[in-house]
Image (cartoon, rainbow, N blue to C red):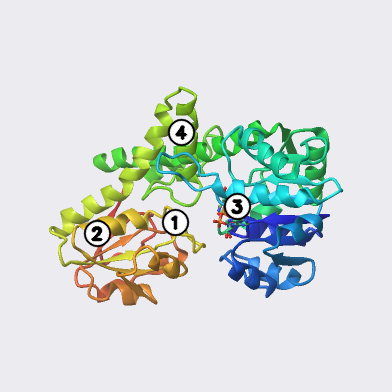
Amino acid sequence: MKISIIGSGYVGAVTAACFADCGHEIICVDIDEKKIQWINQGIPPIFEEGLQELLEKYAGKTLIATTDYEYAVLNTDFSFICVGTPSEENGSINLSIVRAAATSIGAALAKKEAYHVIVIKSTVVPETTEKFVIPILEEASGKIAGKDFGVAMNPEFLREGKAIYDFRHPDKIVVGSIDQRSGDLVSELYKNIECEITRTDTRTAEMIKYVNNSFLATKISFSNEIGNICKKMGIDTYEVMRAVGKDARISPLFLNCGAGFGGSCFPKDVRALINKAKDLGYSPILLKSVIDVNEKQPIIMIELLKKKVGNMKGKKITVLGLAFKNDTDDIRESRAIPVIAELLRLGAEVSTYDPLAIENMKKIFPTISYHNSAKEALQGADACLVVTEWEEFKKLDAEFEVMKEKIVIDGRKVISATSIDYEGLCW
Ligand SMILES: NC(=O)c1ccc[n+]([C@@H]2O[C@H](COP(=O)([O-])OP(=O)(O)OC[C@H]3O[C@@H](n4cnc5c(N)ncnc54)[C@H](O)[C@@H]3O)[C@@H](O)[C@H]2O)c1
């Protein structure tokens, strides 16, 4: 099949490369010329394990990239919208990029005779496909959804860092569609992937994505709350959760307490669902608490630090880990951001290290110091905060010797060194 992928970020680039690997012909579309050039040269626009190998294999052959919507739509049978849906100040999602993408697809559709299916993969709140995307497509194309073109909603559940594995081995594939034909065609694209396809209408598919992320975020905030209580009693919360997770109704996953969740999805999606509920006249108490607990965890880290270090003015504090999680260069909503902001507010000098995310974080904090190794960042530090669960941090030991004071506050339970003044966030 021939597929255009609109937006070549984390979701778009991975979807494009993996669909190419399934044997489909792919045209990536982005407004960012640099990304287009990289993809055509086989260079990933983002870091994701295994992506480079796939792009090197297919770029210039069955996968090409362009800024030209018309070319992409006229030469494919499907267009997957994979553009960003960032948060507004009030938590609602900003649909301006989806609007731009749908308008451009619609304008190209106006010039196309053959049937085409538009698939929304971006995370959008329930009813967006029906009430926002379809009217834009119809207006821009002068055609009618369900008659002249198909529409489906196919939410994405990938984990950054494991996205290619997740594409190949999904727990679920959800295809919501406005009619049987659109749903059948989109389902057919996944025929080489061994997974049952859940077929729904579009608003249900949209809701499944939000409920999925909100539930996982709730598990994390629940674990953080329990961790904060356990710490006050000297109970090992990890031991508690290991036992609790043996209950098949609970599962052991997402029960690790620590500095909280970040990334481009959980915080944004929970806030968007809260906002949608409010619009409907419902106040979602539990979901609001999920966000409140999450925002408190980095502040608790700083409180623990202040107890050990005292006045922070002029103190050199090392932050290890900038990415929102390990194995990615993505810093969106990383817990390192509120941690660094608070340290700077308190007058500390901040020194950092991350294996992948330094260049991205420089755009937010251009004046703090960035180093090429943990040891270099720790040199002469008064204390260290560990914010990301990078595998290499588990092996840190002698590196702490270069600190002025070997105070380490661990937000991820990754540090195993013994000759340090160690404190866990919730343990
Ligand atoms: N990143 C994740 O782990 C993840 C997982 C599941 C779902 N999602 C959802 O998928 C969507 C995309 O997320 P992402 O992380 O890939 O975003 P991203 O910001 O990494 O990528 C979006 C891309 O769209 C491009 N773009 C912007 N305007 C455009 C336009 N008018 N036409 C074409 N391209 C345009 C940008 O240049 C960028 O390359 C969001 O709705 C997000 O919530 C993300």
Label 4 within 8 A of ligand 1 by Cβ: no
Tag 3: Cα neighbours inside 10 Å, few (<14), some, or many (≥20)?
many
Name the spot of residue 60 as percent of width and height, x first: 76, 72
**Could you say where residue 384 lies in the image, as x and y percent from the top left?**
28, 64
Q: Is mark 1 within 8 Å of ligand 1?
A: no
Name the disc covering residue 275, or none: 4
Image marks 3 and 4: residues in contact by CB distance under 8 Å:
no
Q: Is residue 240 visible?
A: no
Label 2: few (<14), some or many (≥20) within 10 Å? many
Mark with earlier residue (2, 3): 3
Residues 369 and 311: in front is 369
Q: Is residue 318 visible?
A: yes
Comes first in the chain, label 3 or label 4: 3
Answer few, some or many: residues within 10 Å of disc 1's Cα (few below 14, many 20 plus, some between 14 and 19). Answer: many
Mark closest to the chain's N terminus, 2 or 4: 4
Using the numbered discs, state the Cα–Cα distance from disc 2 to disc 3 in whole angstroms. 33 Å
Mark 1 → mark 4, Cα distance in angstroms: 24 Å
Q: Quadrant of ligand 1?
A: bottom right
Residue 54 in picture, x, y percent from top left: 70, 67
Real-space Cα distance between discs 1 and 2?
18 Å
Q: Secondary structure at mark 2?
A: helix
Foreground: disc 1 or disc 3: 3
Residue underneath mark 2 = 343
Which residue lies most toward the right here?
114
Residue identified by numbered label 3: 83
Q: Amino acid at mark 3?
A: Val
- Give x and y (percent) for residue 76: 80, 55
Q: CB of mark 1 within 8 Å of CB of mark 2?
A: no
- Compared with 40, 165 (above or below) is above
Residue picked out by circle 1: 324
How far apart are the two marked residues, 1 and 3, measured between alpha carbons?
Answer: 20 Å
Residue at x-position 81% and y-position 60%:
23
